[in-house]
Image: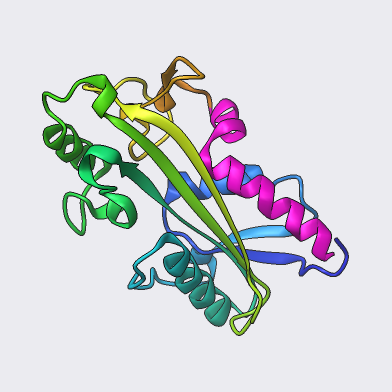
Amino acid sequence: MKSLEKKVVLASGNKGKLRELQQMLSGLDFEVLPQSEFNVDSVEETGLTFVENALIKARNAAEISGLAAIADDSGIEVDALNGQPGIYSARFAGEEATDQENNQKLLQRLEGLPREQRTARFHSVLVFMRHAKDPTPLICHGSWEGYILDKPSGDQGFGYDPLFYVPDQNCAAAELSREQKNSVSHRAKAMALLLEQLKQRS
């Protein structure tokens, strides 16, 4: 990967997401730095899709830092809610909502629904931009199927992990260790695709 920049900025202010991404990128031969080191503030996510918002975040971080950037836009899609909260997952219960508040709102919206009507999936779109004007950014998507529990379970992870039951793991996402989650999650799948494309580009 000699042609890649030695430093890449991670376009996220979400501490849980930063931990996951840094761990997944730890095997690469470039230094991964959070956008906070470059005084990059969170940019307004005005896109209507995960792809658009990931591009906005990556371009903003690349422009301010002068480095290549990786951005993730992700969220949960609940079938019974016509795909909500989707791109609004982090602010489902309001602009400054906590994970607990978002989870509580989701539980309230699904109250009384049987398991077969609680199907859901996590989506992650990762974007890699070599610079702010990169005309061919790498865009990778991963999804993770499951359903919404009727009460939280587990204390690992972040976001909606305590409510997201993963059938093939037979537990909630928040009951998986960090290593387990980082090998099977939506973000892990998107990252595997991104790493493959980065190797091809090098």
| Vertical placement of residue 161 versus 58, above or below | above
Residue occupying the far bottom of the picture? 133
| Vertical placement of residue 200 versus 146, above or below | below
Residue 4 placement (x, y as % from top left):
79, 67
The residue at 54%/44% (across/down) is 187
Q: Examine the rendering and report whether any part of residue 68 can be seen.
A: yes
Q: Examine the rendering and report whether any part of residue 39 can be seen.
A: no
Q: Residue 56: say if magenta.
A: no
- Report the side of 8 relative to 116 (left or right): right
Q: Residue 181: say if magenta.
A: yes
Question: What is the magenta range?
Answer: 178-202
- Report the side of 61 relative to 26 (left or right): left
Foreground of the two, 93 or 61: 93
Magenta span: predominant SS is helix
Q: How many marks?
A: 0
> Which quadrant of the view contains residue 44?
bottom left
Q: Quadrant of the N terminus?
A: bottom right
The residue at 40%/38% (across/down) is 121
| Vertical placement of residue 172 versus 187, above or below | above
The residue at 80%/55% (across/down) is 29
Residue 118 placement (x, y as % from top left):
27, 29
Q: Quadrant of the C terminus?
A: bottom right
Residue 10 placement (x, y as % from top left):
56, 61
Foreground of the two, 189 or 58: 189
| Vertical placement of residue 163 versus 100, above or below | above
